[in-house]
Image (tube, rainbow, N blue to C red):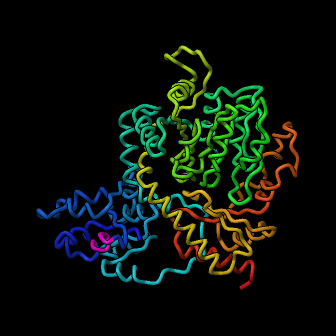
Amino acid sequence: MQILFDTGCLVQALEDLQNSAVLNLCRQETCKGWVASTSVPAILENAKNRDVQSLLRVLAVMTPTAHDIDIALEAEKPFEVELLARLVDTSGLDAVVTLTPEKFSGLPVQILAPGELQKKLDAPPAPVKEVRLLDITASYHEILNAVEKETAETIRSGYFILGPKVAEMEERIASYCQAKYAVGVSSGTDALLIALMASGVGPGDEVITSPYTFFATAGSIIRVGAKPVFADINDITFNIKPEHIERCITSKTKAIIPVHLYGQCADMDPILQLAEEHGLRVIEDAAQAIGSEYKGRPAGSMGDLGCFSFFPAKNLGSFGDGGMVTTNSEELYDQLKVLRVHGSEPKYYHKVIGGNFRLDALQAGVVSAKLNFLEGWTEKRRGNAETYNQLFKDSAMTPFVQLPPEVFPRHVYNQYVICAGNRRDELRTFLNENKIGCEIYYPVPLHIQECFKPLGYKLGDFPAAEKAARETLALPISHEISKSQMEYVVNMIHQFFLGE
Ligand SMILES: Cc1ncc(COP(=O)(O)O)c(C=O)c1O
């Protein structure tokens, strides 16, 4: 539970900091306590030399915007009452804890007296009736202070494009991925595009990739003037099959783009070996896979280049678009940096044509702030996957749904994708009717997309990719969901297949 305390409640807590029941609940992390920054002067004024710093260490500080303050000033109720109610409402907190609940009457938020908080926490949780596929704002509180610090520093510095925040984030991501270099770019799509450009891929070249991936993987190959050549996938991991890649290699092949789909690495050893034998570049599409590993090696550190996306729904998402290219090659790193700024080196002198692939400092700051939480979130996702697997097994659902196995640890479960056979579409409708968010990634494999008709592929060319497109369904897996929400999802799937 996320609780906002009013001034009076915190002044009372100061009288006996160690024994304050409400603060102890926050210390034990039974709930998370917040204080509005606008309450701090009043707390200091009433503190009578008591230890305000120790009090604030137990809580997180929430800063209202000038607009929040304006609205609270215009309202009828006292300023603090309106402001706290607005903060709870707009920030998705659960309740205000106050010594004077009557002052908040009529406002649309839950109000508790200190003595009621424990009772509320002890009460059995309300039955789950809805699970969203992704609720990004549910963990907003966790990162609020860190993001606020990064954002304020950027706004105050006036350094909005590239600059020190981007450089700092690049260094941290490179180290996280165990790559020597990282270059922040404008999106995951642009990461792929610039990686292909830096690899010298262009007209007349062929690039082998999976037909079962997000459009950008193949779209970027066409955008550099080259031809995507598809190789079918493994029907359990949904990742490209090295045996199929080998059959596609011709004298025109310049690169391979394995996609670490849903957060699990492709089978990289045979792919890297094929690339070495044939002199090909390997560009890892790790857009969905930050933090994943293959035989102890992190995604983005194995190929010549690794491409990441910071799209908000990714495990490490920014507050807009953003991406990253990693590499261990100094030569590629230098090229990437030049291509990112229209090929300009030195400024206004262009020996090559690049693009505007720059990352902005506000997004870099958000990513840096969230990076501190990524490992914890990833472990929660992995725990959620284990919980789902167990729940499906316990409810005898495995003859009906194929679970996503972890073939190459460490899977980071950007998506938890089941295979529901020929009843997938019906199941999706049933889950949606029961307010469970689920999604089909991806309903149309790339080889039969209309815009790729000139490539000459037809339905039937890649049976595993086509089956995956027909039968798979992604279930809610984000680190924010609870065990009871997962139980609800599995119960509903059980009900769908067995009607009980
Ligand atoms: C596998 C894959 N490649 C590339 C991208 C492109 O990333 P972005 O949306 O940041 O451009 C995505 C994003 O959804 C993706 O999932």
Image quadrant occupied by the N terminus: bottom left
Q: In terms of image quadrants, where is residue 58? A: bottom left
Q: Position of residue 88 (x, y in %)?
A: 42, 64
Q: Position of residue 452 (x, y in %)?
A: 82, 40
Q: Position of residue 18 (x, y in %)?
A: 19, 72
Main SS of residues in magenta:
helix
Query: Which residue appears farthest toward the bottom when viewing the image?
Result: 500
When the figure is inspected, residue 29 is found, relative to residue 396, above or below; the finding is above
Q: Is residue 341 visible?
A: no
Q: Position of residue 40 (x, y in %)?
A: 25, 58
Q: Residue at x 17, y 60 (%)?
A: 45
Image quadrant occupied by the C terminus: bottom right
Q: Residue at x 74, y 58 (%)?
A: 235
Viewer-closest of 238 and 487: 238
When the figure is inspected, residue 104 is found, relative to residue 372, above or below; the finding is below
Q: Which residues are magenta?
A: 23-28
Q: Residue at x 55, y 47 (%)?
A: 299
When the figure is inspected, residue 6 is found, relative to residue 355, above or below; the finding is below
Viewer-closest of 10 and 209: 209
Question: With 170 as the anchor, is 112 left or right in this view?
Answer: left
Q: Is residue 457 visible?
A: yes
Magenta stretch holds residue 25: yes
Image quarter for ligand 1 equals top right
Q: In terms of image quadrants, where is residue 187? A: top right
Q: Residue at x 25, y 68 (%)?
A: 10
Question: With 436 as the anchor, is 337 left or right in this view?
Answer: left
Q: In terms of image quadrants, where is residue 118? A: bottom left
